[in-house]
Image: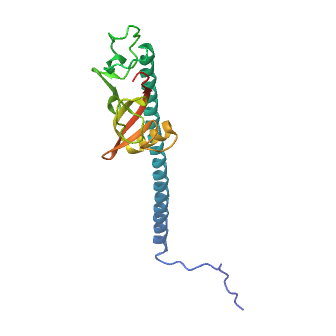
């Protein structure tokens, strides 16, 4: 009796099977690329958040520095606010106690932040609203304004300095300027107004 040959149970070889391996590898590579791309998008969004927070932090730091500089000028000039804010970087004839310059934000005779341009300084009331308006009275403040700040940066500055995102109340006021915002910041009281 002839013995039957024993062969393992395996699928017969198909002539097109060798092509299947390459197709599976290509599919695996595409899936891997999709996963890596998704991770890259998530990482870039995270980095953008960090960059926006850093920009807001830099502007908060500059605004607080300007506030201290204005207050130092105010104290040394016996609470008299100058009509000309060049007293922050030039000698004031009306202030014999001037020990400036008080600021490093001066460029070509104007106050400016390197990232955002000119800084405006003016007197206005504390009352709600944006931009601050009205002069005179005991509730008058010195305001600094920085124009064309990106919206997200301006909102983060408002949150950092006021503790709440309230664009028309508090020490920070935001005014829509196209896609950007103008940031108004109360930097000093006006005691002799």
| Image location (x, y in percent) of residue 49 | 47, 44
In the image, is residue 48 above or below residue 80? Answer: below
Residue occupying image coordinates x 42% and y 25%: 190
In the image, is residue 90 above or below residue 53? Answer: above
User: Which residue lies most toward the right here?
Assistant: 1
Q: Quadrant of the C terminus?
A: top left
| Image location (x, y in percent) of residue 139 | 43, 31
Asked where in the image residue 158 lies, by quadrant, the reply is: top left
Asked where in the image residue 106 lies, by quadrant, the reply is: top left
| Image location (x, y in percent) of residue 90 | 33, 14
Q: Nearer the viewer, residue 170 or 26?
A: 170
Number of disc labels: 0
| Image location (x, y in percent) of residue 164 | 51, 43
Q: Quadrant of the N terminus?
A: bottom right
Asked where in the image residue 114 lies, by quadrant, the reply is: top left
Q: Nearer the viewer, residue 49 or 84?
A: 84
Residue occupying image coordinates x 45% and y 33%: 60
Q: Nearer the viewer, residue 85 or 24?
A: 85
In the image, is residue 46 above or below residue 115? Answer: below
User: Which residue lies most toward the front here?
Assistant: 137
User: Which residue lies most toward the top here?
Assistant: 96
User: Which residue lies most toward the left here?
Assistant: 108
Task: Name the image colouring.
Answer: rainbow
Q: Nearer the viewer, residue 72 or 49?
A: 72
């Amino acid at each position: 009796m002839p013995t039957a040959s024993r062969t393992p149970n395996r699928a017969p070889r198909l002539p097109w099977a060798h092509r299947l391996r390459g197709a599976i590898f290509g599919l695996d590579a595409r899936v891997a690329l999709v996963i890596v791309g998704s991770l890259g998008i998530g990482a870039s969004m995270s980095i953008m958040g960090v960059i926006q927070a850093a920009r807001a932090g830099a502007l908060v730091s500059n605004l607080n520095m300007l506030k201290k500089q204005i207050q130092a000028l105010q104290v040394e000039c016996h609470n008299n606010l100058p009509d000309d804010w060049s007293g922050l970087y030039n000698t004031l004839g009306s202030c014999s106690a001037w020990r400036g310059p008080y600021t490093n934000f001066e460029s070509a005779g104007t106050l400016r932040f390197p990232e955002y341009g000119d800084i405006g300084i003016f007197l206005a009331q504390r009352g709600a609203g944006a931009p601050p308006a009205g002069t005179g009275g005991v509730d008058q403040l010195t305001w600094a304004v920085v124009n064309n700040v990106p919206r997200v940066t301006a909102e983060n500055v408002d949150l950092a300095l006021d503790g709440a995102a309230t664009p028309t109340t508090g020490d920070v006021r935001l005014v829509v300027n196209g896609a950007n915002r103008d940031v108004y910041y109360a930097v000093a009281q006006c005691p002799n107004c």
